[in-house]
Amino acid sequence: MGFRKKFEVEPGTKVRLSKIDASYTGKHDTHEKALPDVQANVERMCKLQYLLYADGNQSLLVVLQALDAAGKDGVIRHLFSGMNPQGTSVFGFKQPSKFEAAHDFLWRAHVRAPSKGEVVVFNRSHYEDVLVVRVHKLVPHSTWSKRYDLINDFETMLSRNGTTILKFFLHISPEEQLARFKQRLEDPSRHWKISESDYSERELWPQYVDAYEDAMALTSTKRAPWYIIPSNHKWFRNLAISQIIADTMDEMGLKVPPTHVDIAAIRRKYHVAELEQKHGGKRRAKEFAKVA
Ligand code: AMP
Ligand code: MG
């Protein structure tokens, strides 16, 4: 079974994260065996991104959401670094600035959404407005509870405008998170990743699980599906996500666009230019000789 079918949150169904094994690796049992498949998927993604850019009629939006240390940064580094920077960008959603907070919650997502021909990755996203905002009670229940419908309408609009949307939740266990916090502590080159709030956020794990389950159940649609990716094993996470992205892009019907110029006429111009280059130099040399 393909990973798209396996990990997609079927629209209209409940989500129970406790029922999903974060350590799942399927028939792939080691990093070494999976690596060639990951590489092949990444190559497909790069080729298709070239076509997306050349075609200039559609776009791709990849949303990455997860609890701390689940590997959003790793996905971006491993899977998107081969794409052409011309036509690809990543935007990280932090706590909204005063300016951003003065707009509706979708405003800052809308201005960063991909234009035609672009691939954009959201590292966190407009979903924070029904996740961290809900868990920390930053707005009343009556406000965040209306946002699911607004998000669905927003994503429908993007999709009707030619944007393919893929949303990934990187699912790790609390044990794996703690192991990764430990690695960060023990490796000074990773100390910059440690945040004061890591442990207070960890204590809110059950509340985040509730918020994620609701968000995914209420906003997984055929146009903009959620995928829950078992992410305790980084290599499996990369394999599943790269395959889902490459398979989806494959179905976007991307091809090199037809030319708008008369190739036969351009070819004639080229031959004239070629002849001039070959013989023109001699002619100019004669003219120079006369002047001298
Ligand atoms: P990081 O991804 O580790 O750089 O952290 C970014 C932080 O910004 C996280 O703690 C997010 O929860 C927080 N954040 C992102 N969007 C929002 C939002 N709409 N409201 C409040 N906090 C947010
Ligand atoms: Mg963080």
Image (cartoon, rainbow, N blue to C red):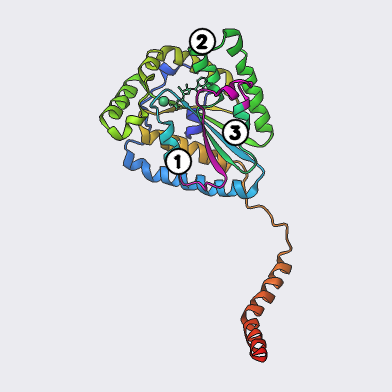
Please name whichever residue, 171 or 20, is drawn nearer the observer in this view of the structure. 171
Say which element carries label 2.
Answer: loop
Residue type for callout 3: Arg
Residue designated by label 1: 79
The circle drawn on residue 112 is 3
C-alpha distance separating marks 3 and 1:
20 Å
Query: Does the image show residue 223?
Result: no
Whether label 1 touches label 2, CB < 8 Å: no
Residue type for callout 2: Lys
110 is higher (above) or lower (below) than 292:
above
N-terminal-most mark, 3 or 2: 3
Quarter holding ligand 2 = top left
Kindly identify the residue that appears in the image at 70 percent across and 65 percent down.
Answer: 263
259 is higher (above) or lower (below) than 177:
below
Residue designated by label 2: 137
Kindly identify the residue that appears in the image at 64 percent across and 83 percent down.
Answer: 279
C-alpha distance separating marks 3 and 2:
26 Å
Start and end of the magenta stretch? 79-107
Residue type for callout 1: Leu
Question: Is 81 colored magenta in this rendering?
Answer: yes
Residue 202 lies, in percent from the top left, at: 38, 16
Whether ligand 1 has any atom under 8 Å from the Cβ at mark 3 is answered as no
Residue 286 lies, in percent from the top left, at: 65, 89
Q: Quadrant of residue 233?
A: top left
Kindly identify the residue that appears in the image at 35 percent across and 19 percent down.
Answer: 174
The circle drawn on residue 193 is none
- Closer to viewer: mark 1 or mark 2: 2
C-alpha distance separating marks 1 and 2:
34 Å
Instruction: Using a 10 Å C-alpha cutoff, classify the residue at mark 3 as few (fewer than 14 neighbours), some (14 to 19) or many (20 or more).
Output: some
